[in-house]
Amino acid sequence: MKTNELILSLGNQENNFDKLIKILNNKKNAIISNNTAQLDELLKDEERVLAVIQNEEKKRKTFISEIAAENSVSLKDSSLEEFINKMNNLPKDPMEKIKSVRKSIREKAARIVQLNSHLALLTEISRNLIKESLLIAFGQGKQLVNRKV
């Protein structure tokens, strides 16, 4: 049953998004506390989770294409949205599970976008603080590095 595999894949993706949210929260805390060792580990973890998310996305698209082909439905891009809109002949229970998980994934994706914007802001603030600290410590106009060398 490809539909059950699709539901399982979506559940895996939801769990992956939970892991990513946890990592991003920890990353934010590491930036705030200036813990570079923890930040390095979190960046590695984030890369691993993003790779898993990408692989799961490929699986999801494959399952959607296979289910659509089995039901003689043509899809343009194998998106979940198009799948839900065109697959009217699937049983109600699996479709409700798919819709429910899709809603949850969308909410988590929105949270990830929000956390990423917070991280970008924190990074910008940190850069400005470092720049201002250097200006205070060394004064304006003084170069830290001899560019002739």
Image (cartoon, rainbow, N blue to C red):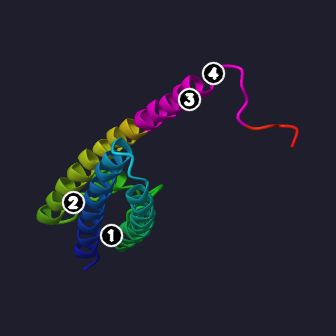
Residue that carries the numbered disc 1 in the rendered image: 71
* Front position in the image: 122 or 58: 122
Q: From mark 4 to mark 3, how far is it between C-alphas?
A: 11 Å
Q: In this view, does 136 lie above or below 80?
A: above
Quarter occupied by residue 17: bottom left
Name the side, left or right, on which 72 lies relative to 76: left
For discs 4 and 1, the disc positioned in front in the rendered view: 4
Query: Hey, what amino acid is under mark 1?
Result: Asn
Camera-side mark, 4 or 3? 4
What amino acid is labelled 3 in the image?
Lys
Residue 131: image tag: 3
Mark 2 vs mark 1, foreground winner is: 2
Residue at far bottom of view: 1
Q: Pointer 2: what residue?
A: 98
Label 1: few (<14), some or many (≥20) within 10 Å?
Answer: few
Labels 4 and 1 touching (C-beta < 8 A): no
Q: Residue at x 43, y 69 (%)?
A: 55
Q: In which quarter of the image is the C terminus?
A: top right
Picture coordinates of residue 18, whole percent (x, y): 25, 58
| Nearer to us: label 3 or label 2 | 3
Which label belongs to residue 26? none
| Mark 1 / mark 3, whichever is N-terminal | 1
Question: Label 2, label 4: how many angstroms apart (C-alpha)?
Answer: 60 Å
Q: Position of residue 102 (x, y in %)?
A: 25, 54
Q: Distance between the residues labelled 3 and 2?
A: 49 Å
- What percent of the width, then of the height, locates residue 42? 39, 59
Amino acid type of the residue tagged 4 in the rendering:
Gly
Foreground mark, 2 or 4, reads: 4
